[in-house]
Amino acid sequence: MNNMPQRLVFFALGVVINSFGVALITLGNLGTSAISSVPYVCSLQFPMFSFGVTTFIWNILLILLQVVLLRRDFKPSQFLQIMVNVLFSAMIDVSMAILGVLYPTMLWEQFLCIGLGCVALAFGIVIELAPNVVVVPGEGVVRAIAKVSGVRVGTPAVTTRGMGPAEMKIIADCIADCIFDFEGKKDEVAARVAELVKKFPLYE
């Protein structure tokens, strides 16, 4: 995907889908996504601010934290996260308004909202990351922490078992095979997973 306008369109589409997914999960009334939990609670505590507004404020704080952590290593282009934040926060309020007609009261209805929201969020993240335009504030702050601390945040569950970059690639390949050709690759994936588990046991 080398065409920049096309990449920007796909990136923006991914951000919009993400906001819809977050809104759908939240309307399930059983909690919200981890990254949105703080702004959601703040919107409940301070009802004069919408969920979108508190999300905007929260993400601005995450961007400022990146600046503090990275200092000179914070590239000016990363200030584009502010524009991403504007779009994401605004679309959360739009999505909440559109989905406001939903009043899930039964437990299965709430789980359905959460399930559909998770699918939408996962799909949006894939579309957002593929163009490789700019990171969102939540991802940006994780990368900043990883850079200054040397800790690869998000991989401790496998690294503590002794796995490294080669095993990460195998895991990524297995996930891709399951997504794009499960029926054709399921036996091969099962064998590769079994080999990894045998080579890196959880308990000695």
Image (tube, rainbow, N blue to C red):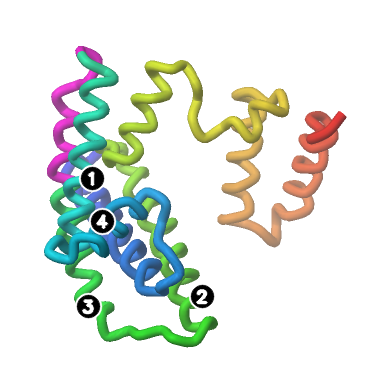
User: Magenta residues: mostly which secondary structure?
Assistant: helix
Which segment did they paint magenta? 72-84
Q: Earlier in the sequence, mark 2 or mark 3?
A: 3
Give the residue number, with chain letter if any, for mark 2: 111
CA separation in Å, label 2 and label 3: 19 Å
User: Which element type, helix, strand or loop, lies under badge 2?
Assistant: helix
User: Which element type, helix, strand or loop, lies under badge 4?
Assistant: helix
Q: Which amino acid type is marked by label 4?
A: Cys
In the rendered structure, the answer to whether residue 26 lies left or right of residue 56 reads right
Instruction: Please name whichever residue, 36 or 181, is drawn nearer the observer in this view of the structure.
Output: 36
CA separation in Å, label 1 and label 4: 10 Å
Tell us which disc is closer to us: 3 or 1. 1
| Residue at screen point 12% across, 64% down | 48
Give the residue number, with chain letter if any, for mark 3: 98
CA separation in Å, label 1 and label 2: 27 Å
CA separation in Å, label 3 and label 1: 23 Å
Tag 4: Cα neighbours inside 10 Å, few (<14), some, or many (≥20)? Answer: some
Give the residue number, with chain letter if any, for mark 4: 42
Q: Position of residue 83 (x, y in %)?
A: 13, 44
Instruction: Please name whichever residue, 106 or 156, is drawn nearer the observer in this view of the structure.
Output: 106
Q: Earlier in the sequence, mark 3 or mark 4?
A: 4
Q: Earlier in the sequence, mark 1 or mark 4?
A: 4
Tag 3: Cα neighbours inside 10 Å, few (<14), some, or many (≥20)? Answer: few
Q: Which amino acid type is marked by label 1?
A: Trp
> Against 200, is 84 above or below?
below
- Checking the image for residue 58, the label placed there is 1
